[in-house]
């Protein structure tokens, strides 16, 4: 980069001569422009000449001028350097260079063509067997992939691609299926469980998984020192006993008919006991999954096919997730006005009628949680009712320009939901006047991500201001907002849950920990705990669902939780791409993708 800096200094002062036109220059001028000593001038110019950026003919003898010729323009050189950054996976840096420094639209257009071709499916035919790489963009780094502390959907997706659990949940059959464990048995009416492991399942670093790794994983997850937010899910786990290399027993404090389903959760992904405490494990985790991560930094995540994967290697050879900040993805990244970049093969909106489109409603819910854990204005039920009446969910969906969202009436979307929710600003304002609210500013917390949360919380603040409620929005890092003590400083929290394949267990997880749990009034929290204990001991699924409905009805009646909407998911992809099914996290499972050719 020093060579480039020196060239740009020269061109900024002497570039008027143009490309290919020699001009005289004195050594004193060069010392001033390059900011170096007289002795270093020849060294710098020789380097630039070797790179074929300039031609330099030194003046012979004292007082004779040198001759300098630019062989490339400033913008052309920046374009070449940006292209090199692109090849290194440093896409965001390349884009920033082009956007901030280049004014020549022909240079920008050539770079844009390269950028378009850089994404999507790339085949390297120089190898004996052609190697297929899929390149997709993402708006932020994905540096924290420890399954014990992964709470966001994209990190959870990568955990699922690289690590695996003892069982996997079948959302159609609504039951766990064998995976790393091929068989399991219930003992003591569900207070003890024995799992039998497959033999010769290799981790990415080559060692074979054993029952000792299973014990290590669950002991680590439940250890308070790990600081996992999922620890509360496994409080009933009393001990993990290694019976042999391929058999492990779990002893619970009380019967739990759902326990095998807990072992399908991503947080229970089996880790190698000899690697998981390494400093870089969260960034470069090791598992048994179909993909292994070979690079993960601020610019690029590289997944390589795990060729020894027990259940059959992926069809692709490599996946590259290129990190481009969200602002850089708008309006052709700001490089050429009115030009749109299509990140083949995955788009949010179609631009070619021949492409395939998948649209679905996300498995999850977006909500507003009220803090009834401590004394405050929201303890008055009339104020909570006023907020509920003021938030017209249909209007919110329209105003935020998200027609694929659906109004939510509960935790789970139900087909052909036909309820009608009453909204009235006049009645809401009257309830505010009747309540004990005296104009205090209520703190609304959300986590800092893209502008998604900011747009939602701004809409809520504006809507509630129309009925006389003052809102102060706080956008916090997820690590901070995940702390229960910090959550309880809020009056309200705007958040959402994306459920795993096992919706029932995801619901239990969200009721036992997280934003909802932290803000519950103690009496309501006790009711929720008692009903969840009953559900876990209930083998009949229909009866369990009745219990969950009781909990939902109580939270809705108390307005502890205001359900807002279910998010929509849509992706468009090239017809040559096969196996591209959108999962519950809004991503495509890379293992199943293949190319028709």
Image (cartoon, rainbow, N blue to C red):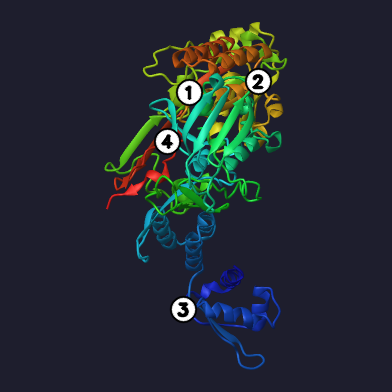
Which circle's residue, 3 or 2, is located before the other in the chain?
Answer: 3
> Element at badge 1?
strand
> Element at badge 4?
loop
Q: Which circle, 4 or 1, is nearer the viewer?
A: 4
Q: CA distance from mark 4 to mark 1?
A: 19 Å
State the image coordinates of residue 239 (x, y, percent, origin top left). 64, 30
Residue found at x 51% / y 28% = 260
Residue found at x 65% / y 50% = 278
Q: CA distance from mark 3 to mark 1?
A: 62 Å
Image quarter for residue 355?
Answer: top left
Q: Which residue is mark 3?
A: 20
Front one among 22 and 395: 395
Q: CA distance from mark 4 to mark 2?
A: 30 Å
Q: Which circle, 1 or 2, is nearer the viewer?
A: 2
Q: Which residue is mark 4?
A: 583
Task: Assess disc 4: are there few (<14), some (14-19) or many (≥20) residues with their C-alpha within 10 Å of its C-alpha.
Answer: some
Q: Which residue is mark 1?
A: 565
State the image coordinates of residue 69 (x, y, percent, origin top left). 51, 80
> Element at badge 3?
loop
Assess whether mark 1 and mark 3 are in contact (beta carbons under 8 angstroms): no
- Residue 467 seen in the figure: no
Q: Which residue is mark 2?
A: 519
Q: Is residue 373 depicted above or below 217 in this figure?
A: above
Residue found at x 58% / y 82% = 46
Which circle's residue, 4 or 2, is located before the other in the chain?
Answer: 2
Q: Which circle, 4 or 2, is nearer the viewer?
A: 4
Q: Which circle, 3 or 1, is nearer the viewer?
A: 1
């Amino acid at each position: 980069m020093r060579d480039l800096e020196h060239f740009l200094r020269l061109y900024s002062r002497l570039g008027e001569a143009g490309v290919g036109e020699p001009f005289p220059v004195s050594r004193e001028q060069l010392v001033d422009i390059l900011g170096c000593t007289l002795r270093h001038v020849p060294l710098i110019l020789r380097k630039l000449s070797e790179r074929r950026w300039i031609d330099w003919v030194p003046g012979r003898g004292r007082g004779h001028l040198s001759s300098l010729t630019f062989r490339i323009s400033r913008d052309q050189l920046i374009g070449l350097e940006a292209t090199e950054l692109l090849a290194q996976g440093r896409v965001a840096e390349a884009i920033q260079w082009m956007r901030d420094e280049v004014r020549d639209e022909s240079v920008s257009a050539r770079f844009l063509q390269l950028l378009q071709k850089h994404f999507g499916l790339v085949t390297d035919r120089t190898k004996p067997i052609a190697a297929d790489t899929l390149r997709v963009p993402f708006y932020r780094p994905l540096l924290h992939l420890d399954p014990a502390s992964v709470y966001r959907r994209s990190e959870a997706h990568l955990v699922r691609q690289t690590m695996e659990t003892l069982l996997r949940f079948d959302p159609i059959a609504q039951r766990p299926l064998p995976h790393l464990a091929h068989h399991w048995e219930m003992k003591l009416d569900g207070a003890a469980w024995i799992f039998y492991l497959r033999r010769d399942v290799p981790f990415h670093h080559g060692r074979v998984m054993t029952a000792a790794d299973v014990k290590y994983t669950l002991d680590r997850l439940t250890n308070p020192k790990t600081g996992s937010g999922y620890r509360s899910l496994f409080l009933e786990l009393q001990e993990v006993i290694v019976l042999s290399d391929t058999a492990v027993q779990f002893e619970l404090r009380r019967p739990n008919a759902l326990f095998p389903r807990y072992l399908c959760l991503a947080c229970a992904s089996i880790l190698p006991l000899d690697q998981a405490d390494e400093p870089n494990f969260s960034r470069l985790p090791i598992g048994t999954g179909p993909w292994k991560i070979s690079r993960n930094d601020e610019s690029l995540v590289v997944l390589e096919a795990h060729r020894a994967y027990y259940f059959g290697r992926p069809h692709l050879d490599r996946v590259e997730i290129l990190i481009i900040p969200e602002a850089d993805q708008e309006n052709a990244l700001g490089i050429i006005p009115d030009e749109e970049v299509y990140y083949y093969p995955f788009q949010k909106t179609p631009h070619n009628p021949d492409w395939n489109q998948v649209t679905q409603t996300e498995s999850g819910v977006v909500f507003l949680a009220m803090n009834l854990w401590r004394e405050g204005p929201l303890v008055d039920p009339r104020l909570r009712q006023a907020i509920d009446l003021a938030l017209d969910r249909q209007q919110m969906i329209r105003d935020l320009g998200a027609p694929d969202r659906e109004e939510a009436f509960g935790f789970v979307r139900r087909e052909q939901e036909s309820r009608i929710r009453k909204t009235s600003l006049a009645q809401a304002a009257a309830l505010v006047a009747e309540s004990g609210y005296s104009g205090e500013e209520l703190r609304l917390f959300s986590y800092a991500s893209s502008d998604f949360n900011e747009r939602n919380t701004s809409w809520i603040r504006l809507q509630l201001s129309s009925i006389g409620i003052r809102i102060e929005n706080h956008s916090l890092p997820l690590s901070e907002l995940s702390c229960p003590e910090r959550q309880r400083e809020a009056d309200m929290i705007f958040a959402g849950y994306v459920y795993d394949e096992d919706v029932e267990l995801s619901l239990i997880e969200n009721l036992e920990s997280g934003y909802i749990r932290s803000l519950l009034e103690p009496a309501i929290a006790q009711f929720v705990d008692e009903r969840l204990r009953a559900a876990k001991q209930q083998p009949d699924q229909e009866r369990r669902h009745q219990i969950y409905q009781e909990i939902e009805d109580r939270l809705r009646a108390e307005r502890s939780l205001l359900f807002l909407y279910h998010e929509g998911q849509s992706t468009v992809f090239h017809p040559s791409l096969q196996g591209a099914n959108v999962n519950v996290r809004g991503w495509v499972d890379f293992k199943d993708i293949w190319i028709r050719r």
